[in-house]
Structures are given as C-alpha cells and as structure tokens.
Image (cartoon, rainbow, N blue to C red):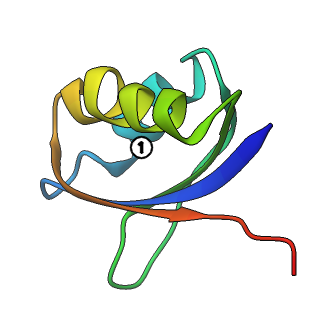
Amino acid sequence: MVQAYILIQTEVGKASTVAETIAKLPGVIQAEDVTGPYDVIVRAQADTVDALGRMVVAKVQQVDGITRTLTCPVVHL
C-alpha cells in the first residue's frame, strides 16, 4: 500500500467545496481545507505508485476549482 499527501491550490473561494468533493473519492483517507500556500491537503492511498498516479490525474485533478496539485508520497526509512 502506497500513501501520499496531495497539496492542492484552488480558485479563490473553492477550497471547502474541493475538499468536500475529494473526500468522497475512493482511496482518499482525509481531505482538509487549510490556510497557507495550499488550500487543501489530502491524504490518499493506493495499491501501487502507478495506481496512485492514475488516481491523482484521473480523479483528483478533474475536480472543478483545482488549479494545481503537488503529490508527496510517504516514505518509510
């Protein structure tokens, strides 16, 4: 199982709606709207890195109001 944080920038005033929409997607553990350089932070999981990438591109980035994402895979050293 691969987990990642997905940092999301949204259009002005869309953070809450984006977080609510993303929270309902399969594989999303948590989605919170936050303050700072990013508007929403998501914790997600998938079986493989490829599946995680597909989820981000095919599901997360398609949510209306998102302008940019940054995916940060969790590593266990």
Q: Secondary structure at mark 1?
A: helix
The image shows residue 31, relative to residue 75, as above or below, that is above
The image shows residue 6, relative to residue 31, as above or below, that is below
Q: What residue lies at 54% left-to-right and 17% top-to-bottom?
A: 25
Q: What residue lies at 32% left-to-right and 83% top-to-bottom?
A: 37
Q: What residue lies at 63% left-to-right and 33% top-to-bottom?
A: 48
Give neighbour class at mark 1: few <14, some 14-19, many 20+ (Cα, 10 Å): some
Task: Using residue 56 as the reference point, say whether residue 46 is left or right of it.
Answer: right
Type of amino acid at the residue the image marks with label 1: Ser
Task: Using residue 8 as the reference point, say whether residue 76 is left or right of it.
Answer: right
Task: Using residue 26 as the reference point, say whether residue 34 is left or right of it.
Answer: left
Between residues 43 and 52, which one lies in front from this camera angle? 52
Quarter where residue 16 is shown: top left
* Residue 2, horizontal then vertical, whole percent: 72, 44
* Residue 40, horizontal then vertical, whole percent: 44, 57
Q: What residue lies at 38% left-to-right and 27% top-to-bottom?
A: 54
* Residue 26, horizontal then vertical, whole percent: 61, 15
Quarter of the image containing the C terminus? bottom right
Between residues 70 and 13, which one lies in front from this camera angle? 70
Residue at which label 1 appears: 16
Between residues 39 and 7, which one lies in front from this camera angle? 7
Please tell me how many numbered marks the rendered image carries: 1
* Residue 1, horizontal then vertical, whole percent: 80, 37
